[in-house]
Image (cartoon, grey):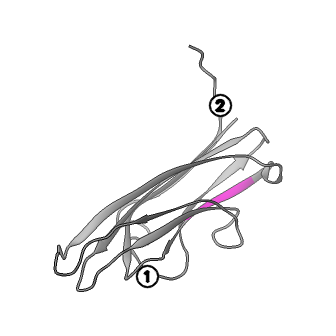
Amino acid sequence: MTFLAVTISDYQFQEVGIGGGSLPLIISPGPETLLTSVFLNITSINNQIELKATIGWEAQLLLLNIVPKLLFRIRRGGTAAPAPVVFQTTDSVFLGTASEGPWVPLDFTTAFQHTENATAGIVGTFQQYALTVEHIGQNSVTITGPVHLDGTVYL
């Protein structure tokens, strides 16, 4: 069995704990919202960048049906358009109808990982990778945390 030696050339993480920073953050359908970001030093065209995110959120069934649908994005080079989206995913849940209950908050966690190779245009720069959320469903959702984003640059 052969093992490859992997060198980490940069690592950074940001975490906002439950109740920390601007959490809890209530979001309604509408614009993309920045959750957190990291800056990574890209030194070589041979770099591989790995990003991992975890977001805790909550939805509550009230008197209406709620179908929260969250669009999570990682953007490179900025926190909103026109910064390119390098990864996106959605998370959604059907909570039932008002007559089914429960009428209590329900907690969810979304986690994902993205890996990309460095390109010539970003070599020699510190690149910002921003974690954002956009609510594209119904009613409101609360980002409760923790919100965690970490980035590792491998050589």
Does the segment drawn in magenta span residue 129?
Answer: yes
Mark 1–mark 2 distance (CA, rounded to whole Å):
42 Å
Q: Secondary structure at mark 1?
A: loop
Q: Are marks 1 and 2 in contact (CB under 8 Å)?
A: no
Residue 20 seen in the figure: yes
Tag shown at residue 71: none
Does the segment drawn in magenta span residue 138?
Answer: no
x and y percentages locating residue 109 in the rendered image:
37, 58
Residue that protrudes farthest toward the bottom in the picture: 63
**Residue 6 image-quadrant placement:** top right
x and y percentages locating residue 3 in the rendered image:
59, 19
Residue that protrudes farthest toward the top in the picture: 1
Residue drawn at x 32%, y 78% as measured from the top left: 66
Q: Is residue 134 positioned above or below 127 on the image? A: below
Instruction: Please give the residue where the numbered disc 2 appears in the rendered image.
Output: 7
x and y percentages locating residue 38 in the rendered image:
60, 56
Residue 24 seen in the figure: no
- Considering the image in quadrants, where does the N terminus appear? top right
Residue drawn at x 83%, y 49% as measured from the top left: 120
Q: The disc labelled 2 sits on which kind of residue? A: Thr
x and y percentages locating residue 54 in the rendered image:
44, 55
- For residue 17, side relative to residue 132 (left or right): left
Q: Main secondary structure of the magenta part?
A: strand
Instruction: Please give the residue where the numbered disc 1 appears in the rendered image.
Output: 28
Q: Exactly how many numbered labels are in the figure?
A: 2
- For residue 53, side relative to residue 12 (left or right): left
Along the polypeptide, which appears first: circle 1 or circle 2? 2
Residue that protrudes farthest toward the right in the picture: 120
- For residue 20, side relative to residue 100 (left or right): right
Magenta span: 126-131
Q: Secondary structure at mark 2?
A: loop
